Amino acid sequence: MIQLEATDTCPSPLNVMEEVELSNEEILRYGRHLIMPEVGLEGQKRLKAARVLLVGTGGLGSPLGMYLAAAGVGTLGLVDFDVVDFSNLQRQVIHGTKDVGRPKLHSARARILDINPHCNVELYETILTSQNALEIIGEYDMVIDGTDNFPTRYLVNDACVLLGKPNVYGSIFRFTGQCSVFWAEHGPCYRCLYPEPPPPGMVPSCAEGGVLGILPGIIGCMQANEGVKLILGKGEPLIGRFLLFDAMRMRFREFKLRKDPECPICGENPTVRELIDYNEFCGVHPEAESVPLTEFDLTPAQVAERLQRGDPFLLLDVRNPEEWAICRVEGARLIPLPELPGRLGELEGADDIVCYCRSGQRSGRAAELLRASGFRNVYNMVGGTLRWSDEVNPSMPKY
Amino acid sequence: MRVRVELFGRAAEQAGVRTVELDLPANATSATAAEALAERYPRLEWLRRGSRPARNQEYARWEDPLAEGDEVSFIPPVSGG
Ligand SMILES: [Zn+2]
């Protein structure tokens, strides 16, 4: 790994630069950049020539798209397949209330072009997969990772290592964020840090655990900052340094990260030489939602019917108390999933239990745990309170 | 030997503390520290399987030996974006 001093130039993926010129309008627009020697006319031309791929236009992608466009990055590629939802607006500030229901790519492009019509926006309305990642990423100088799941994070990392591109990494959960620059040619990659994903279900998603709306703004801006430095080839990048941010305490911690000679993809004897099946690697089954009901599943309508009949069964809510305070099914009893293993004694004698949560994921794990602990008739209410709101009682709020 | 463990995010919430002093046997490693921590705070049992240890602000391996006065951290992966 190379040691860089604060005054050293940082490595840049822009080696051969196409000739670009700035119009008078652009010179006026970028004036505050142009008068700083660290950017100058030459740096602003580098920004204009740069091609940056943003994977995800959500929490991190929002500030990334807006600030990189404003800074004058010439081409932004956006990858997303999602549609704007009300629950996105608390943090995904590139989309507005008027955009709810619209593809995120379309509202993101509109916002970017409003900020800077000189930005060339290229859209990929798809999930990034092992089949398309090399082709898409190959068109860009660097990737900035704003995805929200482990399979895509490993996919982005591996594709960047195989293509020799830098990957500006950022990740968020609740009140903490992480940021680093992974670039195997100059330092460690994501797999040097986490060679394998955590066991499925161990690390909660933001949908399950929540996230402070400001947090992706802070971390996404840090990624944008690192991206601009790489384009300029100036400053001291986060290569080999892993930044941990705690919003609650307003503290940054920095950890030194070395390239692992045993890294499965960027090490001395790599075992991963091409892209793999990342859903399988992470133990994730994205098609799980459409899986037909098993004998242990009940739809919200079936649960409502059993409640109405007065069937004797225990309705167990395994969400957190904060979620219980938002809404609940009448007659349910709360034992949050993390506390369940230690509170099995409270369920003794119950021989008919229906578990529910927000989406049916955590309650599925709770039902498995109860069955493994010897409870016999344990069911999962599929779709959780979200589906209950859709199919049984529309006055139940969704979150 | 005595080491100081610093906890972040969810782990700190689950333990209810941010720093923990641990008394460990002379040949202790990052793994020993995680196990001792899980014994004191059972909800931190996942750290050994779901985080990466760091020793004195530098990423380490589970089998790396610790020394008196070390600061040990466990950094869980997060995937939100
Ligand atoms: Zn690596």
Image: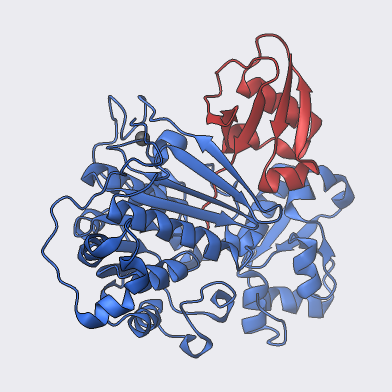
**Position of residue A189 measured from the top left corner of the image (x, y, whole percent):** 37, 39
**Position of residue A81 measured from the top left corner of the image (x, y, whole percent):** 37, 72
Quarter location, residue B73: top right
**Position of residue A279 measured from the top left corner of the image (x, y, whole percent):** 40, 51
Q: Is residue A270 shown left or right of residue B35? A: left
**Position of residue A395 measured from the top left corner of the image (x, y, whole percent):** 72, 87
Q: Can residue A126 be seen in this view?
A: no
Q: Which residue lies furthest to the top in this view?
A: B26
Residue occupying image coordinates x 55% and y 50%: B78
Q: Which quadrant, please, contains the N terminus of chain A? A: top left
Using the image as rendered, state which of residue A98 and residue A230 is in the foreground: A230
Q: Is residue A303 shown left or right of residue A238? A: right
Q: Residue furthest left?
A: A19
Q: Which shade of the palette goes to chain A? A: blue
Q: Is residue A370 shown left or right of residue A215? A: right
Q: Which colour scheme is used?
A: by chain
Q: Can residue B74 be seen in this view?
A: yes
Q: Which quadrant, please, contains the C terminus of chain A? A: bottom right
Using the image as rendered, state which of residue A159 and residue A112 is in the foreground: A112
Residue A187 sits above or below residue A321 on the image: above
Using the image as rendered, state which of residue A167 and residue A85 is in the foreground: A167
Q: Which shade of the palette goes to chain B? A: red
Q: Is residue A264 shown left or right of residue A354? A: left
Quarter location, residue A269: top left
Residue A61 sits above or below residue B34 on the image: below
Residue occupying image coordinates x 83% and y 76%: A330
